[in-house]
Image (cartoon, rainbow, N blue to C red):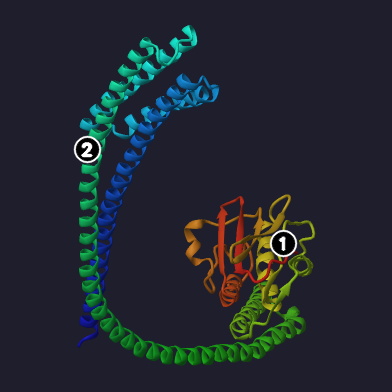
């Protein structure tokens, strides 16, 4: 089977399996929601039944307390009566709110609550008569009022039975619906899981075949990468050797030109002396270019030996070297928060030399040149930025910034070979970091680099 077809089948199989799993998950979710909703309605029905029983028990307790008080004149029964009567309105209101979803039941509960209220009013009248006239419980007036209360209580029992029957009927319906939902959910989950298992098995088989194919491709790629690494090392060694061997003839050119100038300057006219100066100047530039190429080659060959670097100390050391070489003693250096980092000190020193020398070089034309160095910590990296107030560069040419021999200013205006930033990028990338630059033409530049964060040490 061709790799393209195998990969297509694997993708289709995985896609179908994922679609099937998503469908099963959706169905399971909706079925579960229905089951939960049915369960809630069952719980709601039980809650209504409990609340109905609570109201019925409350009115019975109030009636018993009322009769106990009438027969014994014991204040204890009167207090029990008052407590129950005080709680009943809230219980009745809750019962009415619980049945608001069912119009039939709501009408029954409203009638039931009205009758309960009639019973409460009747008991209140009897208690008031007792307190006001101090009549005996066997008094005909009391007997008549009690008979009326009994009739009301019978109505209450009948209405409570009707409500109970309605709720029990709803309970049976809802329990049946809940059982049906549970059975349906189990069936869907079982069928869906079987289908998903089949599709996943097929996808897994195709995936194993694809992984085996990729492993073979990876081994081939690793072999190619190993060969490329050997080739790169050979090229670096070749460039290093060529650059090293070119230094001798260049020194000879510069030396013989200097001797020729010293010994025969009186025999040359002004044009001859100028041409000889051009030869010496270009040989020196070529020498600097070779030195930079050697440094570029070394930056890719040197083994990285990471250690904690105290950045303020290293920057001060590099700054003294840079300002001494460029005669830029009037450039102000400002160090803000500088974090310690684990890296190769010699390579990071070369990075700082290139960036700080550029900052000094491109800001020396300003009346008050200034260079600011700062750092920040962001998750797994620590970043350093070097900002100057120099001439800046046009961000439209940013893609040329870190290339070898790429310059954004003329050599007559600002000397250099265009290799420094390429060295910076190579060193930082070898450390697993990134480099960047941003600028506003005429206002200054900011060059930064990030390195992996090893330990939370602060400089």
Quarter assignment of residue 418: bottom right
Q: Nearer the viewer, residue 47 or 259?
A: 47
Q: Secondary structure at mark 1?
A: loop
Give the CA separation, mark 1 to mark 2.
Answer: 78 Å
Viewer-nearest of discs 1 and 2: 2
Q: Quadrant of the C terminus?
A: bottom right
Nearer to the camera, 358 or 458: 458
Residue at the spot 23% in from the left edge and 82% down from the top edge? 6
Q: Which residue is disc 2 drawn over? A: 166
Q: Residue at x 21, y 78 (%)?
A: 9
Tell me the quarter of the picture where residue 305 sits.
bottom right
Q: Is residue 260 above or below residue 18?
A: below
| Residue at 25% over, 40% down | 167
Disc 1: which residue: 338
**Residue 454, above or below 118:** below
Q: What is the number of callouts on the image?
A: 2
Which quadrant of the view contains residue 137?
A: top left
Residue at disc 2, secondary structure: helix
């Amino acid at each position: 089977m061709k790799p393209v077809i195998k990969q297509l089948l694997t993708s289709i199989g995985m896609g179908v399996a994922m679609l099937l799993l998503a469908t099963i998950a959706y169905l399971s979710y909706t079925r579960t929601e229905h089951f939960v909703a049915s369960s809630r309605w069952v719980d709601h029905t039980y809650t209504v039944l409990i609340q109905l029983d609570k109201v019925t028990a409350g009115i019975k307790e109030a009636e018993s307390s009322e009769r106990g008080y009438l027969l014994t004149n014991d204040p204890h029964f009167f207090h029990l009566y008052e407590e129950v009567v005080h709680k009943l309105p809230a219980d009745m209101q809750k019962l009415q709110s619980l049945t608001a979803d069912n119009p039939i039941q709501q009408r029954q509960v409203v009638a039931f609550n009205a009758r309960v209220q009639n019973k409460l009013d009747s008991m209140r009248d009897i208690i008031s008569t007792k307190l006001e006239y101090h009549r005996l419980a066997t008094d005909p007036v009391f007997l008549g009022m009690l008979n009326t209360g009994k009739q009301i209580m019978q109505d209450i029992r009948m209405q409570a039975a009707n409500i109970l029957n309605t709720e029990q009927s709803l309970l049976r319906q809802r329990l049946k619906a809940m059982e049906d939902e549970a059975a349906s959910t189990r069936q869907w989950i079982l069928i869906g899981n079987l289908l998903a298992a089949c599709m996943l098995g097929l996808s897994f088989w195709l995936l194993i075949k694809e992984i085996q194919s990729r492993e073979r491709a990876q081994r081939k790629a690793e072999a190619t990468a190993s060969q490329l690494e050997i080739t790169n090392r050979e090229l670096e060694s070749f460039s290093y050797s060529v650059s090293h061997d070119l230094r001798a003839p260049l020194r000879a050119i510069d030396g013989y030109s200097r001797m020729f100038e010293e010994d025969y300057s009186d025999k040359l006219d002004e044009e001859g002396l100028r041409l000889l100066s051009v030869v010496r100047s270009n040989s020196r530039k070529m020498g600097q270019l070779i030195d930079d190429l050697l440094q570029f080659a070394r930056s890719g060959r040197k083994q990285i030996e990471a250690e904690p670097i105290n950045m303020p100390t290293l920057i001060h050391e590099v700054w003294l070297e840079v300002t001494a070489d460029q005669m830029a003693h009037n450039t102000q250096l400002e160090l803000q928060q500088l974090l310690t980092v684990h890296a190769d000190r010699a390579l990071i020193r070369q990075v700082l030399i290139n960036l700080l020398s550029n900052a000094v070089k491109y800001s020396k034309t300003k009346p008050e040149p200034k260079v600011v160095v700062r750092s920040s910590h962001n998750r797994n990296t620590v970043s350093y930025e070097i900002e100057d107030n120099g001439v800046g560069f046009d961000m439209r040419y940013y893609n040329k910034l870190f290339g070898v021999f790429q310059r954004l200013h003329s050599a007559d205006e600002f000397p250099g070979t265009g290799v420094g930033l390429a060295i910076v990028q190579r060193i930082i990338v070898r450390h697993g970091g990134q480099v960047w630059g941003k600028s506003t033409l005429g206002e200054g530049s900011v060059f930064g680099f990030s390195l992996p964060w090893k330990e939370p040490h602060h400089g």
